[in-house]
Image (tube, coloured by chain):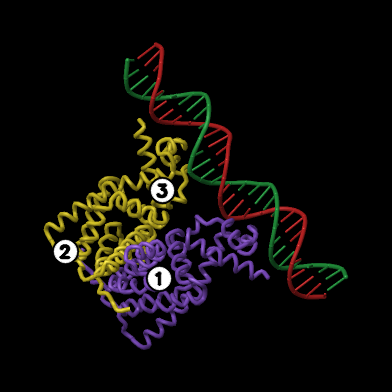
Chain colours: A yellow, B purple, C green, D red
DNA sequence: ATTAAATTAAAACAAGTGTTTGAAATGGTT
DNA sequence: AACCATTTCAAACACTTGTTTTAATTTAAT
């Protein structure tokens, strides 16, 4: 029965991590929400740090391969895609997470936002190490969409794109509340994603300028 | 002589806050770096929370009015500016901070990034409350640059822009190191800013699409 | 020089953290 | 049923956190 306790911890942890961040979520809060004993976290995961890794890994293991597939399909159908098509290949993998777990998409992107801002580069390295192939494939697709850009431009704009995405998602809850109050139109994570794609695509494909 | 201790605390605090975030910077770390007694933080600022506010206020008090001036000058010279001109009005105010304090620009934008992701909306409200006028002026300028966009589009894209900016700056240290190692070209905060403007401007001015 | 206020200093406080311990309970296997 | 490994549990541990206290010291004004 160890698997039950383990997933109950993971399920409670990911919600709290997404909402309050990693540092501001205590193991006691996690275990009490999960209805398990405090010590079980260290028993099953070894440490809080490894619990965080496991929470992220669960999502990345389904998200990244899905992106890989989408990219492959895109390039097969459209050998020279434009920027918007490249970034659109993220949409289905993101929405897929909603089927894996309730609110999975929102939780994942918020976790990603938290991880990127809190872990001072550790998450970036972790992702690069474990999922580097797919990410390189994504970069190559971006190059196809904007062959006139220099490598350093690509580098920076991709990180700008990550920043836009990750930051928006980390604050998505607050932003959705403001938007709903100010514009009286209910929106959700999927809506934000569809608003993000044109912004990111246009930014990434913007002409370079003489400084 | 209270002012000396006070500014020494602020100077040490802003560097540590920018580097490690607010939650992960202890008062003991701040006071030992500042060479002052632990209790002096509570004596001079009341609490850690109010110290954080004071650190941010020092920068915002010079940054926001400078933006206001730039906007006023821009609109006087160019009543119908384009998006890039609007965002370019942020450059001088940002670089101005480098003259106020060593590395001021980098520290400020990193603080802003930390504050936005860690304070769960408090910083946004604080800024809106104390500097709402200038910010509304900026939004109006964006509307002038893209009158075809709906208000909700403006809202989202401005927050995307903030996200791009703030996240990039929060991770600017790591990104600069990677870029220098991979592309052998030394760069700095000013360089990033000049790379950011085209990206943000193009993203903010992107055509809306049928979802 | 004396006095009162402002500031600094060392120490302790109360609360919260992740982790470890050792015994109790539970599980499946023979 | 008896055994052993796995898992749960309550408690304590060691440590860090922001804050408060109380006394010592410095500063400024009379």
Relative placement, left or right, of C12 versus A28 is right
Residue A112 image point, x, y percent: 35, 54
What label sits on residue A81 in the rendered view?
2
Residue B191 image point, x, y percent: 37, 73
How many residues crowd mark 2 within 10 Å: few (<14), some (14–19), many (20+)?
some
Relative placement, left or right, of A107 versus A89 is right
| Residue labelled with disc 3 | A16
Q: In this view, does A142 lie above or below A44?
A: below
Residue C18 image point, x, y percent: 48, 43
Report in which chain the residue with disc 3 lies.
Answer: A
Say which element carries label 2: loop
Q: In this view, does A39 lie above or below A145?
A: above
Residue drawn at 53 percent across, 67 percent down: B55
How many residues crowd mark 1 within 10 Å: few (<14), some (14–19), many (20+)?
some
Spatial separation of the CA atoms under disc 3 and disc 1: 36 Å
Residue B112 sits in quarter: bottom left
Say which element carries label 3: helix
Residue drawn at 11 percent across, 58 percent down: A77
Residue A140 image point, x, y percent: 21, 60
Q: How many labels does the image show?
A: 3
| Residue labelled with disc 1 | B188
Say which element carries label 1: loop
Relative placement, left or right, of B184 versus A146 is right
Q: Are marks 3 and 1 on the same chain?
A: no
Frontmost residue, A57 versus A7? A57
């Amino acid at each position: 029965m160890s698997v039950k306790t383990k997933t109950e911890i993971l399920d409670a942890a990911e919600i709290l991590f997404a909402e309050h961040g990693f540092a501001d979520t205590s193991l006691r809060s996690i275990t009490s929400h999960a209805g398990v004993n405090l010590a079980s976290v260290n028993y099953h995961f070894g440490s809080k740090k490894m619990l965080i890794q496991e929470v992220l890994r669960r999502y990345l293991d389904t998200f990244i391969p899905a992106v890989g597939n989408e990219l492959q399909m895109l390039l097969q159908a459209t050998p020279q895609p434009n920027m918007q098509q490249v970034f659109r290949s993220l949409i289905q993998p993101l929405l897929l997470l909603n089927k894996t777990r309730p609110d999975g998409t929102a939780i994942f992107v918020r976790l990603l936002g938290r991880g990127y801002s809190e872990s001072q580069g550790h998450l970036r390295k972790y992702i690069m190490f474990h999922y580097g192939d797919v990410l390189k494939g994504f970069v190559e697709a971006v190059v196809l969409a904007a062959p006139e850009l220099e490598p350093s431009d690509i580098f920076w704009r991709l990180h700008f794109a990550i920043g836009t995405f990750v930051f928006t998602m980390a604050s998505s809850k607050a932003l959705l509340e403001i938007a709903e109050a100010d514009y009286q139109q209910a929106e959700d994570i999927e809506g934000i994603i569809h608003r993000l794609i044109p912004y990111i695509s246009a930014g990434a494909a913007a002409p370079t300028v003489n400084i």
